[in-house]
């Protein structure tokens, strides 16, 4: 089911409320992430844990959905003010006549890895081996869905030659890989490291770093970001400014602290039982986080090119990339912080 078909069906029953401490005089805002424990969405969690939203006079409630496509659904339905997900959703939504924009870029990599299960009879070695295989994604319409299709296409495979299986993130994904019920799948950290450490998977395509993403997708990229409906941003510039400023401070924190320092701020359930594994996964991801929250030059064009390659309904000449992001609030935040 395409994302836009579900825009008026809020799915709060499936949500988890992660952080929300009411403050008497603060303005209430609600954000939704496509899986709050994923390292790629860490800046928003840190902004809440470090009190940066409170410093801005904001009372920010953070909700979590299994996949970014669900986050986009709730944003368009007006159930939340901001979404934390992949930049590609802004382009996909605009192609369907829905105006949203990235107001702060969190990561300059896709932050994803395509892993092959080692628990099947004949493990895949490259994406060209996907013919006749089952490929796991977090959900239909999710970024993992279209990027999986793109990688298969680049390997010369038509969409009809393999099967896409939506399995969600985290434990559901791990279970599917461990049991060999899928041949390969695309997932974020720290789940990728859990599977690799258990020798249940091997890397087919690594897009967790900036360099790996560029090699796989052909240019500079924007992965996770904070985005909102353009009409909401236009009507609430002050709240947007303060929201961005809070998350931008978290980006600075990430760039100036070690993985151990960052972990000390996080809830225990984020880190899990294997602290060493999480620490290494986080340390490897830190360089991919943006330092200033600005859209990387050329990234919108790369993302559009990848999307259009697998979805004929997205016609590049009909997409106005300038309306899918703004650097205005990031620039203002950087001036205030001195960066």
Image (cartoon, grey):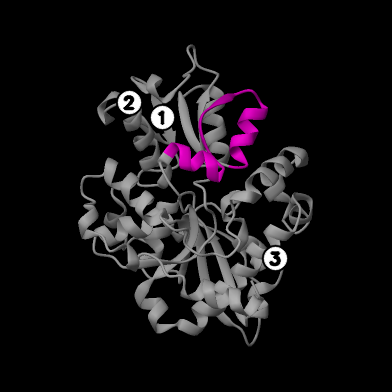
How many discs appear?
3
The earlier-in-sequence mark between 2 and 1 is 1
Mark drawn on residue 135: 1
Q: Quadrant of residue 254?
A: bottom right
Q: Is label 2 in a helix, a strand or a loop?
A: loop
The earlier-in-sequence mark between 3 and 2 is 3
Evaluate whether residue 167 shows in this view.
no
Question: 249 or 55: which is nearer to us?
Answer: 249
Mark drawn on residue 162: 2
Q: In which quarter of the image is residue 257?
A: bottom right
Q: Residue furthest bottom?
A: 25
Q: Which region shows up in magenta?
A: 189-216
Q: Residue furthest top?
A: 121
Q: How crowded is mark 2: few (under 14 residues within 10 Å), some or many (20 or more)?
A: some
Q: Is label 1 in a helix, a strand or a loop?
A: strand
Residue that mark 3 sits on:
49
Evaluate whether residue 335 shows in this view.
yes
Q: How crowded is mark 1: few (under 14 residues within 10 Å), some or many (20 or more)?
A: many
Residue visible at 56% across and 24% down in the picture:
202
Say whether marks 2 and 1 touch (CB < 8 Å). yes
Residue 322 is situated, as x and y percent measured from the top left of the image, at 34, 67
Say whether marks 3 and 2 touch (CB < 8 Å). no
């Amino acid at each position: 089911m395409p994302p836009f078909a579900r825009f008026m069906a809020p799915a709060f029953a499936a949500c988890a409320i992660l952080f929300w401490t009411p403050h008497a005089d603060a303005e209430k805002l609600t954000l939704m992430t496509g899986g709050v424990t994923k390292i790629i969405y860490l800046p928003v969690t840190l902004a809440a844990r470090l009190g940066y939203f409170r410093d801005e006079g904001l009372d920010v409630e953070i909700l979590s959905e299994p996949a970014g496509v669900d986050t986009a659904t709730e944003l368009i339905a007006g159930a939340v003010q901001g979404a934390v997900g992949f930049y590609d959703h802004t382009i996909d939504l605009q192609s369907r006549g829905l105006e949203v924009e990235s107001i702060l870029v969190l990561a300059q990599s896709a932050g994803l890895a395509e892993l092959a299960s080692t628990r099947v009879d004949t493990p895949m070695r490259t994406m060209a081996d996907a013919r006749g295989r089952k490929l796991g994604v977090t959900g239909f319409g999710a970024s993992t869905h279209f990027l999986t299709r793109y990688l298969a296409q680049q390997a010369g495979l038509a969409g009809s030659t393999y099967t896409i299986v939506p399995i969600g993130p985290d434990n559901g994904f791990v279970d599917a890989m461990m049991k060999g019920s899928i041949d390969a799948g695309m997932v974020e950290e720290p789940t990728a490291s859990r599977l690799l450490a258990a020798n249940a998977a091997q890397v087919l395509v690594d897009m967790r770093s900036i360099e790996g993403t560029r090699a796989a997708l052909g240019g500079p990229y924007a992965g996770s970001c904070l985005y909102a409906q353009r009409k909401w941003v236009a009507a609430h510039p002050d709240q947007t400014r303060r929201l961005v400023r809070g998350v931008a401070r978290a980006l600075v924190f990430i760039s100036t602290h070690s993985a151990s320092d960052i972990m000390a701020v996080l809830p225990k359930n984020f880190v899990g039982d294997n602290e060493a594994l999480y620490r290494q996964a986080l340390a490897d991801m830190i360089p991919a986080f943006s330092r200033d929250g600005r859209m990387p030059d050329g990234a919108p064009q790369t993302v559009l090119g990848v999307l259009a390659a697998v979805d004929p309904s997205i016609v590049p000449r009909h997409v106005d990339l300038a309306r899918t992001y703004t650097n205005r609030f990031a620039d203002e935040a950087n001036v205030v912080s001195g960066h």
